[in-house]
Each structure stands twice: as C-alpha cells, then as structure tokens.
Image: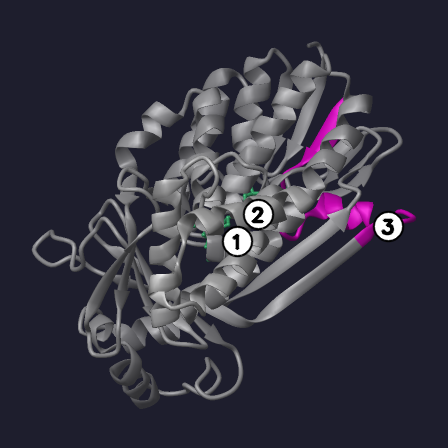
Amino acid sequence: MKDKISIVGAGLVGSLLAVILKQKGFTVQVFEKRKDPRKSEIAEGRSINLALSHRGIPPLKLAGVYETIEPYLIPMKGRMMHDEAGGLTFQSYGKEDQFINSVSRAQLNELLIESAEQAGVEVYFDHKCSDVNFDSNTVFFENGTVVNADLIIGTDGAFSAIRKKLALNDRFNFSQHYIEHGYKELAIEPVDGQFRLEPNYLHIWPRGNFMLIALPNNDKTFTCTLFFPFEGSPSFSSLSNKEEVDRFFTKYFADAQELIPNLTEQFFNNPTSSLVTTKCKPWYKGRSILLGDAAHAIVPFYGQGMNSGFEDVRLFVEMAEKMSWDWDEILPEYSTHRKKDADAISELALHNFLEMRDHVAHPDFLRRKKLEAQIQEKFPEDWIPLYSMVTFSDIPYSEALRLGKIQKIVMDEVLVLDESKIDFQQIIERFNALKKAG
Ligand code: FAD
C-alpha cells in the first residue's frame, strides 16, 4: 500500500479511480491538462449531460459519492418519441421500476474531483502530459514537471497521450474510426421556471438517417443533441444559412423548433463535434495501463461510455484486491479479461444508432419489443432483452452481445409467424438450445 500511483486525466474515470485507490491506502497523484473546473467557466467537454445507468452506480457507491450525486439525478423511465406531426409515443426502457438517469457532466466531474481532494489525493491542474518512459515509470508534462511512480494510469480520454506513446511500441494494435455523423447541442430554455417537455423521459425524434434527442437538466433546461451527417443532403454542410436551418427544422422537428426561439443563433454558434470509436491492444506496458475512453472510446448511442469506464474502475480495483495489488500480474490479467467486453460494447453502441434513429419508429420494431416483454414476463430467468442486459445488469457486455445475437435469430423466426401460431414455450426452448450450442 506504500505504492505511489500517478493518474493522468482528471475526467470522470480518472477522478473516480483516484478516490477509490486513495481510500485503499495508496499515495495518489492526479494530473489534468485543463484548469480546475471548479474555478473556471470553461465548458470544455464531450457533452453537457449524460445518462448514468446501472453499471455506473456501484463504482460511485464504492467511492462513497453516490449519495451526494443522487439528489441531482433526473430519472428517465423510457423513450418519448416525437413523430413528424408532433405525436408522442412512450416506450419503456425495461420493467416498470427500471430507469436511467440524466446527470450533468460538469457537476459529476467536479464532485469527483472534490471527493478525490477530500480523500487526500493530490490533484494538479494545468499539467498536460507530453511523454512517458515505460522503462523507468516516468511521466513528463509540458510545463517541465517530471514524475516517477510505481504505477501510471492513463485516463486521459479518447485522444490519450499515454496511448499515443504506447503506439510507438512493437506489436501495439490501434484503430480509430469516425462515423459519418457528428453532433451539435442545442438548449431548450424553461418558461416560467418550468421544463418545456416532460422531464422524466429521454425525448427522441427519430428521422431515419438522423435524429434529435433531448435530456433534462436540473436547471429545468433540456439539452438537445442533433446527430446528423457531416456531408450530403440534408447535412451539416448543406445547412449554410438561417433560412435553410429554419426550413429543415420546420420539416423534421417542428415541435422542437417551437421550443427553441433562438434556434438558428444556437445552430451557428454552437460547435459541431465528431464521434469516434477507438480500439487498441495491449492496454498496458510495464507498470502503465489505460482505463476508460483512453483504452476504448465508443460512440454514445447506448449511453455506456462513462458507465463502462466506471465499470472498468470497479473491475480493476476488485481484481487488484484479489491479486494482492501485484501490478505485474494484474495489468496483463485485467487487460485480457476486459478487452472482449470493451469490443462488445463498442459494436453494440454502433448498432444502437440504427435502432435509435430509425428502427424505433417502425411497427416491426414495436411488435418485436412487445413480444420480447411478454417472453421476459413468462421466463424472467431465461430471457432478458438485450437493452436490459446492457443497461440494467452486470452481465458482461460480450455475453450480452452473444445472447442478443441468439435472441435476434429466434425473434426473426417468430416474427414471420401468424400471431395465433406463437408458442412461448417453443420460443424459450429454441433460445436455450441455441444458447447451449454456443
Ligand atoms: P474523459 O471524460 O474524456 O476525461 C479525460 C480527461 O483527461 C479530461 O479531463 C482531459 O482534459 C484529460 N486529458 C486529456 N489529455 C490529457 C493530457 N495529455 N494530460 C493530462 N490530462 C489530459 N457515456 C455514458 O455513459 N452515458 C451517456 O449518456 C453518454 N453520452 C455521451 C454523449 C456524447 C455526445 C459523447 C461525446 C459522449 C457520451 N458518453 C456517454 C461517453 C462519455 O462522455 C465518456 O465515455 C466518458 O467521458 C469517458 O470518461 P474518461 O474519464 O475516460 O474520459
């Protein structure tokens, strides 16, 4: 427990990990390239708010911070879909008592940094990591600081400096893929201090090749995110003036447009950001390791980037504790064990974009969902719908992906049948047989 641990990146994952490792008795230092977010107004980040779900909660509890953030969470019990005529359809996420939570990224990050400092972690802002020496366990910063540690953890996000350095090593695999869509955030302000949409839902305007979503915030605003192609028609590049933006929103999102009086101003003032998936292997070298987005950045369509990063933290600490904190054993073991799950959620997240922007609005999808809910009700031990496995369980992502693929085979067979021919016992027997066959 005398080991000194240096964590690079005080984002969501790095600051949570710092709290827990400090509580375990280590000397922990965190180095962050940004200024202290508690003292500055910079809104540099990936999104204004995030969906916190089941997997993210136990790690927050482990760090003792969940009770503090809980009052600020806004439960979202399902999708509220807006069609082009402004009609609304509700689709629950799971069982009646299951929901996900909208949380402010800035508030959560600040709370975690605060908790780290209170626990005794030394947090250094304005420290941008520029280099690492994996042989001598040394980290170098642009401001000239040089630090030695027994363990170096890179939680420096999707464009990790530590990962860039790892990439210079022989047999290091790395891939990065930008999807053709980017995103832009737009705010819906409250009126008379009240939310302008029902707050306890994730609102979604699915429009085939693009979509708008909206998550509630504590200040009664909603943050809308337009996921939209960069090129083509319509796209970010095809909407070049106020009239085009107005026409586009009137055609596709008329009910949302009514709620954003300064829409075109926001559209042209707010940044357009890209969405990347990164994969790499191995995640470690010597006594240095990557966690969170630094190891596996994914697109946001399953709401699992942060949740999987928090789960990384829990699994890493649990494994380390079991292995008596022997880093030389833990780093390869953790990386091998976790990699397949990171790859699985990466695939699931890409696929869920199709589901959200397109499938959710189709009658076939709704029938599939209804049937799945019935199967689950009759055989709760055997059949958990894919969304629930990912969002409301601890089932490893790779297993959820495998079972989800089998469920799809079974459901494709069932959906061509006449309603009167559907036999739930047969469905579950077929599913269990395929599951057993692997
Ligand atoms: P980050 O949050 O990126 O933190 C990395 C930190 O490292 C930052 O503070 C950065 O300043 C610092 N840093 C970077 N380089 C250096 C350096 N060289 N030296 C020192 N410090 C450095 N996830 C969910 O679970 N639910 C959601 O609903 C959700 N919605 C999302 C919506 C959008 C639009 C996007 C883009 C992402 C969303 N995510 C969501 C994903 C989530 O944002 C990330 O998975 C999460 O932020 C990862 O945390 P992290 O700490 O690994 O990385």
Residue 281 appears in the figure: yes
Label 1 secondary element: helix
251 or 35: nearer the viewer: 251
Q: Are marks 3 and 2 in contact (CB under 8 Å)?
A: no
Residue 149 in the image, given as x and y percentages of width and height: 75, 24
The first of marks 1 and 3 along the sequence is 3
Q: Which residue is mark 2?
A: 403
The type of residue carrying mark 3 is: Leu
The disc label shown at residue 168, or none: 3
154 or 138: nearer the viewer: 154
Q: Are marks 2 and 1 in contact (CB under 8 Å)?
A: yes
Vertically, is 334 above or below 51? Answer: above
Q: Which residues make up the magenta segment?
A: 145-173
Mark 1 to mark 3 CA distance (whole Å) = 41 Å
Q: Is residue 183 left or right of residue 165?
A: left
Residue shown at 74% from the left, 43% from the top: 162
236 or 76: nearer the viewer: 76
The type of residue carrying mark 2 is: Leu
Residue shown at 48% from the left, 58% from the top: 301
Q: Residues within 10 Å of mark 1 (few under 14, many from 20)?
A: many
Residue 260 in the image, given as x and y percentages of width and height: 22, 70
Q: Which residue is mark 1?
A: 407
Residue shown at 36% from the left, 87% from the top: 241
Residue 10 appears in the figure: no
